[in-house]
Amino acid sequence: MKGKNNQLYHFFTTELMNWNEYDNNREMPWKFEKDPYKIWLSEIILQQTRVEQGLAYYNRFILKYPTVTKLAKADESTVFKLWEGLGYYSRCRNLLATAKIIAENHDGVFPSNYEDIVKLKGIGPYTAAAISSFAFNLPYAVVDGNVTRILARFFGIETPIDTGQGKKAFSSLADTLLDSKYPAKFNQAIMDFGATICKPKSPFCATCPLAKNCFSFKNEMTSFLPVKSKKIVKKERWFYYLLVQYKNYVLIRKRDEKDIWRDLHEFVLIESTKKESIKKIINSTGAKFFSQKAMMVKPCNTLFKQQLTHQVINASFIEIKLIEKLPLTGYFWVHKKEIKNWAFPKLTNDFLKENNF
């Protein structure tokens, strides 16, 4: 059995590397990149983000912050504005924190070994393996969604990929299959293979060089593998934003709670656990503080919605124009012309765009 497995491992790696050499035409701007800073930046941006969307952000970041030292010295608000629209803003916070650590503790030089890289904030085993192999040709296998999908299908592994047991098993198998002489090429090959051939839906099994020994292809189980044990239950939240204005100024604040959109900005917010009538919101304690000093209260008829990994945000906006400038602890006034300079969640930007702010 062991000899049979070894033959299967050899077939997998050999055919994958041959495919990479002769048939892999996938182009990526960071492909063959050796600068660990640029590799790190691309990997962080591509977490939870499609390549098509992430590419423009990557290019803008490299243009504005060509080195890790430049990023470490950057103004936080400017970086968040540049990140705006990518979502999962903890990535941006970790990006800044790690850049500062490298600048201060490593003299601006990116660590060149896996152990030091994986200690950095926001860098897990996958990203550390990617940087180690691509930048320094170290023998560490990357294990992401593409990799687990390929391995589960080819070897017929039904262990759920989102369990501790599954993660350990797939990581061990990837290390076994890794071409230790050319780890960077192997890692790039398997990721490209998952993105172009062994895709989540409608994989190209008919032309796949691994098909003749692929368990799921031979057993018609491609659509059933890989297996996930957890089903995400999404929480629904209702946000009612008060667009409080005085002349050409709008009241905003920076979100600093450990919640979604931390470090982004927002208008005065009244949150509810369920859908409420606009009339009830306007008459609530939070809104009355402003509506009693208002010359206009105008609800926006459009309901804005944003789907996040674990929650759905429903948002309504209510314009309130004041007759005098009222203070509110934690909030500050900004001119309407400058509103575009502040980082907001996508949902708020959709509202601003639709209403020509």
Image (tube, rainbow, N blue to C red):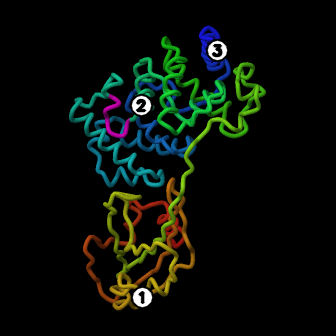
Q: Is residue 112 above or below residue 45?
A: above
Residue at numbered disc 2: 125
Judging depth in this view, the residue of 253 and 315 nearest the camera is: 315
Residue at numbered disc 1: 283
- Disc 3 from disc 1: Cα separation: 69 Å
Q: Does the residue at mark 3 contact the one at mark 1 (Cβ under 8 Å)? A: no
Q: Amino acid at mark 3?
A: Leu
- Classed neighbour count for the residue bearing mark 1: other residues with Cα under 10 Å, few (<14), some (14–19), many (≥20): few
Residue at 45 percent of width and 75 percent of height: 240
Residue 144, position in %: x, y?
Answer: 52, 33
Q: Amino acid at mark 1?
A: Asn
Q: Look at the numbered disc 1 and give the secondary structure of its residue.
A: loop
**The image quarter in which residue 161 lies:** top right
Mark 3 and mark 1 lie on one chain; the one further toward the N terminus is 3
Q: Does the residue at mark 2 contact the one at mark 1 (Cβ under 8 Å)? A: no
Highlighted magenta segment, given as a residue range? 117-123
Residue that protrudes farthest toward the top in the picture? 3
* 250 relative position to 276: left or right: left
Residue at numbered disc 3: 8
